[in-house]
Image (tube, rainbow, N blue to C red):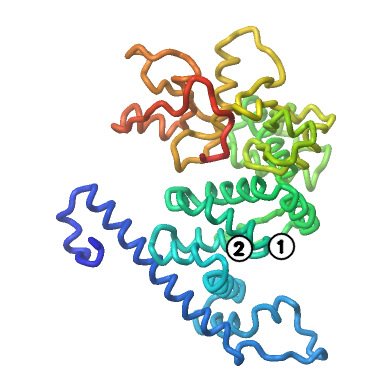
Amino acid sequence: MLAARLDAADAGSLDDDDLLELVAGWERLAGWVRARQADAVAVLAGRPSQNPTWPDAAEVSARQRAYGLAPDELSLRLGVTRRRAERMVRLARGGEAHLSDTVDALRAGTIDEAKAHLIVEALEHTAIPVALEVQDRVLPRAGSRTLSQLSGDVQAALIDVDPRDAACRHAAATADRRVCRPRVLPDGMASLYAVLSAADAIAIDQALHGAARAAAAAGDARTIDQLRADALLDAVLCPGVGRPERPAPRRGPTVHITVPLSVLSGDDTVAATLSGYGAITPDQARRIAADPHSTWRRLLTDPASGRIVDYGRTRYRPPAELAEIIRLRDGTCVMPTCNAAAASCDLDHTISFASGGSTSDGNLGALCRRHHLLKTHGGWGSSNRRPAHSSGPHQPGE
């Protein structure tokens, strides 16, 4: 391994490609170390000394009974939170059980620790056959996916493998919706974290963005992030009032949901896609599609080809219609590791217009401004992203 043969002093003699491989080599080595650590954690967590028999009078929580004393021991020794130590135990137990392929991939360096945790934690409570099938589907390309993309892959595979169980899990998870207590940030700031259904979270996000864009268009000098934060503050603390210097927000942008026609007829074997989120269960899709509020915009697709057969309304000017179809088709920037929403992206000609490239769905794709600039001025290139007849909207980041 290149990483094992070089130290920092030697790195200066390498070209860019070899330096990238050196970085990747150290990343693989880090995965091997974490997998070996998980092996040791598994031995520790399995010992009787770490799993005492608790008397009923002790009123020990089910969580503590499940994990035993190992998280407490690891927390003290490593100086980490008990929750972090519990994650270490979960990963170790997954490696000993039916999710051993995930820990083996970590050991081989094809995925990193964060991705291993994501897969194990998403699958540890699902039926073993489902977990194995999902693991087999997502592991082969997990190494080239970002963490958020891999999360979307796992979610989509869970729905595809067992949509009814996915619907049950979603119903149970909805009961755990919450807004966590503020977390301290530097310089007198704090963060708030909310856990909501995907549909509600996307609707709130779009409403905040719509209010921010409206204020900016009216001349407000604050940044979009500042406007979003202030719009949330107004909505919660001053509902219906608003601050005098802020113009009344216009109606927020439409939220799109891509629904195969068969889903509306009761088909539970294919997932739908919520724009800005990813795969959702057929049951969720039917509920959202039936929502009478015009905030939602239903996109119907042919389940065989995935092509959009009805995108809600017709437009007189074809360029605007074509731009909308491309953004809905791509979902995000087409750079493999970028999740920037296509709605905020440039539309790039794969073959430049000056070189004879056509302005068509087969030669256009969404590129965020950064990656568009890299392609235009940074020496990057791109290939045709999809055939002229699209295979349909993809998962965010796919």
Label 2 sits on what residue type? Glu
Number of marks in the rendered image: 2
Labelled disc at residue 181: 1
Tag 1 near tag 2, CB within 8 Å: no
Disc 1 marks a residue whose amino acid type is: Arg
Residue extending farthest to the top is 316
**Up-down relation of residue 333 to residue 352 (above or below):** below
In percent of width and height, residue 258 lies at 67, 31
217 is higher (above) or lower (below) than 169: above
Vertical relation: 276 (above or below) 309: below
Q: Is residue 387 left or right of residue 240?
A: left
Extreme residue toward the left, this view: 13
Between 253 and 7, which is closer to the camera in this rendering?
7
SS type, badge 1: loop
Q: For this view, does 134 lie left or right of residue 36?
A: right
Q: Position of residue 349 (x, y in %)?
A: 42, 20
- Identify the image quadrant of residue 104: bottom left
Q: Position of residue 121 (x, y in %)?
A: 60, 63
Secondary structure of the residue carrying tag 2 is helix
Mark nearer the N terminus (1 vs 2): 2
- How packed is label 2: few (under 14 Cα within 10 Å), some, or many (20 or more)? some
Q: CA distance from mark 1 to mark 2?
A: 23 Å
Q: In the rendering, which numbered label is found on residue 102?
A: none
Image point (61%, 57%), residue name: 189
- Give the number of the mark in front: 1 or 2: 2
Q: Which residue is mark 2?
A: 121
Residue 393: % across, % down: 59, 31
Whether residue 360 is visible, yes or no, is yes
- Tell me the residue at 36%/61% (across/down): 27
Quadrant of the image containing the N terminus = bottom left
Where residue 130 sits, quadrant-wise, is bottom right
Pick whichever, 256 or 204, lies toward us: 256
